[in-house]
Image: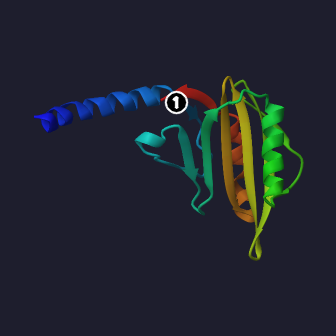
Amino acid sequence: MKTLLTKKFSVPLLIAVSILLAAGCAKPKVDKPQGFAEVETGMFSGAVYKAVSPEGMLYRVRTVKNYPFMELEFWGNSLKNQLIKEGYHLSGEEIDLEAEGSEGILFEWILPYGSDDYIYMTAILLSGRRIIIAESAAEHTVYKKYRGSILDSLKTISLGLL
């Protein structure tokens, strides 16, 4: 009897918990970069946007809580210092971003890998109490091919609810 009762309530309970969790997540709305295909991320990773180019260049946008609550300058410096500490080389100056009313910053990093150089783009935008993180990486010739469409897509990022 206990097993039947557990089975009877477990599915509705799981559905209710899933809805509550999803309602609290901020899903990034993003225009697909030209030349990319969107990737389905599944029910429980709905707060992540993914797209991929034919060459395999991944573009990912996700959100996290701005906790502890800090300004863009703090998060930008933290990201920059951490990646430099991990051996990434900043390829130029940081780029200021604005996307649907959110202020942000973008960094492009050079990462030697074997005989090739890869470019790793990291961007962060603040939207209220959420931090939007966008990332993309590819071998430098592939990255340069899609750089413009990635930058155009970054300008369209906004938050919605799942």
Left or right: 9 with respect to 63? Answer: left
Give the residue drawn at x 56%, y 49%. 51
* Image position, residue 133 (x, y; %): 67, 40
* Image position, residue 122 (x, y; %): 73, 47
* Image position, residue 148 (x, y; %): 73, 48
According to the image, what is the colour scheme of the structure? rainbow
Residue type at tag 1:
Cys
Does any portion of residue 71 appear in the rendered image?
yes
In which quadrant of the rendered view does residue 55 lie?
bottom right
Of the 4 image quadrants, the one containing the N terminus is top left
Element under label 1? Answer: loop
Q: Is residue 79 above or below residue 132?
A: below
* Image position, residue 120 (x, y; %): 73, 55
Give the residue drawn at x 86%, y 55%. 91
Q: Is residue 31 above or below residue 159?
A: below
Q: In this view, does 147 lie above or below 18?
A: below
Q: Is residue 146 above or below residue 4?
A: below
Q: Name the residue under label 1.
A: 25
